Image: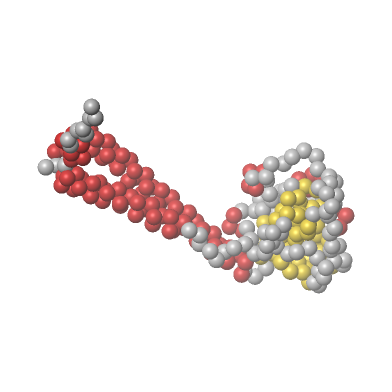
């Protein structure tokens, strides 16, 4: 009754199933690992954002590379802004995602003399044209204490942004303390601070950036379950197909067509 399972056609079915099942299982584990990574990332961000602020220069120094486990760590810095070395970063999205403009980066010279920290003060809209420097609210004068989120220097590899040729004065595509130190000769600590609060308050200021999303776990677990269900359905489908063919016969349709009376031919 099931001798048809020895046919070349069913051998091909079996081979296809043998390839599909482990592939789908592996894809399910790939999505599951992405889910685990997302959960771990969210936990790390939550821990970093809720931790008590630590002085920026207690962690960073010139040439310092911010590790992943310190990214988003709450930091503080006290000093005076240096508007003479302020610059903007082109083609950045407004916090609500509706417009493209600039990030405003202003060095903060530390009061303890340990150097300067690049502070991303927020987002402003574009100027009249791509070559014009945007209208930027002036930073507070005098000594300020800022708190914010530690971020790693941007590179073409980490950001996916390709650095083009010469840009208008004081406009860049990446926030990179090492590059700015080369251009200005200043002592800049590695990484930068994404501003969250300032004391005294900034008043008229760029739009502050939002905290990273650390609540959603994404769809990866659902995708993993889907792949595993698909893997389980492959052998089930083969069994159903085999039972159906055993019941109806592999050539039932062909035989019925061959045994049908020929249509009359008009003379």
In the picture as drawn, the residue positioned furthest to the left comes out as: 1
Q: Locate residue 1, reporting x and y percent.
A: 11, 42
Instruction: Give residue 253's quadrant in the image.
Output: top left
Instruction: Give residue 193's quadrant in the image.
Output: bottom right
157 up-or-down from 267: above or below: below
Query: Depth check: 212 or 20 in front?
Result: 20
Left or right: residue 153 versus residue 136 is left
In the picture as drawn, the residue positioned furthest to the top comes out as: 267
In the picture as drawn, the residue positioned furthest to the front comes out as: 267
Name the colouring of the figure.
Answer: secondary structure
Q: Is residue 197 visible?
A: yes
Q: How many badges with numbers are in the image?
A: 0
Residue at the image point whose x is 86% and y is 62% from the top: 138
Residue at the image point whose x is 35% and y is 51% from the top: 230
Residue at the image point whose x is 74% and y is 47% from the top: 173
Query: Depth check: 50 or 110 in front?
Result: 50
Q: Locate residue 205, reporting x and y percent.
A: 80, 65
Query: Depth check: 59 or 196 in front?
Result: 196
In the picture as drawn, the residue positioned furthest to the bottom comes out as: 200
Q: Is residue 184 visible?
A: no
23 up-or-down from 87: above or below: above
Q: Locate residue 65, reporting x and y percent.
A: 66, 50
Q: Locate residue 239, reporting x and y percent.
A: 22, 48
248 up-or-down from 105: above or below: above
């Amino acid at each position: 009754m099931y001798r048809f399972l020895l046919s070349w056609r069913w051998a091909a079915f079996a081979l296809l199933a043998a390839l599909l099942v482990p592939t789908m299982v592996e894809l399910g584990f790939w999505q599951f690992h992405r889910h685990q990574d997302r959960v771990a990332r969210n936990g790390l961000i939550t821990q970093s954002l809720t931790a008590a602020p630590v002085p920026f220069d207690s962690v960073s120094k010139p040439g310092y590379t911010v590790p992943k486990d310190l990214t988003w760590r709450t930091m503080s810095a006290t000093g005076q802004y240096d508007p003479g070395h302020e610059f903007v970063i082109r083609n950045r999205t407004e916090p609500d995602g509706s417009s493209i403009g600039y990030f405003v980066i202003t060095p903060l010279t530390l009061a303890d003399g340990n150097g300067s920290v690049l502070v991303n003060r927020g987002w402003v809209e574009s100027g009249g044209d791509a070559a014009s420097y945007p209208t930027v609210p002036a930073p507070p004068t005098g000594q300020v204490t800022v708190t914010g989120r530690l971020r790693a220097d941007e590179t073409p590899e980490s950001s996916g942004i390709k650095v083009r040729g010469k840009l208008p004065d004081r406009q860049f595509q990446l926030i990179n303390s090492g590059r700015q130190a080369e251009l200005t000769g200043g002592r800049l600590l590695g990484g930068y601070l994404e501003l969250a609060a300032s004391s005294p308050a900034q008043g008229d200021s760029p739009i502050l950036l939002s905290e990273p999303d650390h609540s959603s776990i994404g769809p990866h677990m659902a995708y993993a379950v889907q792949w595993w269900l698909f893997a389980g359905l492959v052998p089930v489908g083969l069994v159903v197909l085999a039972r159906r063919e055993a019941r109806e016969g592999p050539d039932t349709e062909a035989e019925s067509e061959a045994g049908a009376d020929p249509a009359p031919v008009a003379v």
